[in-house]
Image: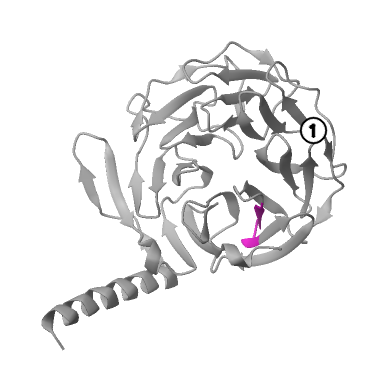
Amino acid sequence: MSSRFRIVRTVVVVAFVTAMLAGCGVVSTAGGTRSHGTHRRVVGQLSHPLLPPSVRIVLSSTVLESISCSVSGYCLVEAESGRFWSLSGMSKVVELGQSPLVRVKNAGIGSASVSCFSGDRCMAILFSRDVVELVNGKWQRPVGLSLGHVLTGLGCAVDGFCAAIDGLGDAYLFSGEAWSTAVNAWGSALSISCQSSQSCFAVGGGVSHWNGEKWTKPVAIDPGASMVAIACLDSMSCVVVDNEGRYLRWKTDHWTSSIDVTSSSLAAVASLNNGDYVVISDVGVFYSLRAGKVKKVGSLKNLDGLVSGMACTTATPGDIICYVTSTRGSVYVQRIPQSSLAR
């Protein structure tokens, strides 16, 4: 056996063992290497080709409030304490900390306080009434939107259009360059999904739609339950999940009747670019949805606390990568083969 072959085989074996140990235990974010002049710290490495089905990354000792990923696979995580981390391309975890202009932070309410929309551009709620943009890993200057009212929801589309709604029902719209003044949106929103500047759906006490000119009056579509989250593929297809373990689907111009998924509360939903949806229960069980069919496709092992949010990407061929946040400061990276989805 040549020395070159022995070296290559040793490197592969070491990488494989490292990945398997990460999947069986915890990837700690302690230590790491600080990059000079960027206020960022690389705190962990993940290698996708050898990634086991599930990896847990401990980020914080507090609740992770929100997570969002762009279509390219760049994700932003926000903790209740006001700290931020990015996860990009399944290769690294970077602690961004707080905005350089922010010394004290009171995070927004609900699970929609961050939203990523293009490449590594994201929006985040600060002080419950301001928003700040993250571009190339660097914070921009915060913009004050709602005076005296808490911002309860934030959503951005891939074209850079964003909408933020406060508890009074005022909406603020981002054109890609600047935020608008308040536009009445009928009520507060817990979750917002925007597909373009012409279409956003928001859920709170009911479902409201932005059609490019105005918000429709909220419609109650799920009597007796509380809607938890919404995700949309486009203006013709959306899924809402509730605390009774059911989902409802928007099909072109109407909402379907609720469909049972599980006896547990559903915690989050993500749309995939192939038309499927992935939902997760608050106890960490994944289900895929397609054309009324429901299929269990995985579960988190040793979930610490309850699920607080989820974002999924299809940036890796053949696999869906879902990032799941917990109420006890961990992120779980779950690999779901596309071949396992409901058909």
For the question of whether residue 261 can be seen, the reply is: no
| Residue 193 in picture, x, y percent from top left | 64, 35
Please say if 101 is above or below 303. Answer: above
Q: Is residue 87 left or right of residue 12?
A: right
Kindly report the secondary structure that dominates the magenta region of the rendered protein.
strand
Residue 337 found in image quarter? bottom right
For the question of whether residue 18 can be seen, the reply is: yes
Please say if 203 is above or below 44. Answer: above
In the picture, the quarter occupied by the N terminus is: bottom left
Q: Is residue 28 left or right of residue 77?
A: left
Q: Is residue 283 left or right of residue 311?
A: right
> Mark 1 = which residue?
206
Residue 229 found in image quarter? top right
Between 228 and 148, the residue placed more toward the observer is 228
Between 250 and 220, the residue placed more toward the observer is 250
Q: Amino acid at mark 1?
A: Gly
| Residue 123 in picture, x, y percent from top left | 48, 30
Q: Please say whether residue 280 is one of the residues in the magenta stretch.
A: yes
- Residues in magenta, as a range: 276-286
| Residue 75 in picture, x, y percent from top left | 45, 44
Q: Secondary structure at mark 1?
A: loop
In the picture, the quarter occupied by the C terminus is: bottom right
Question: What residue is rendered at 37% in x and 73% in y?
Answer: 21
Q: Please say whether residue 308 is one of the residues in the magenta stretch.
A: no
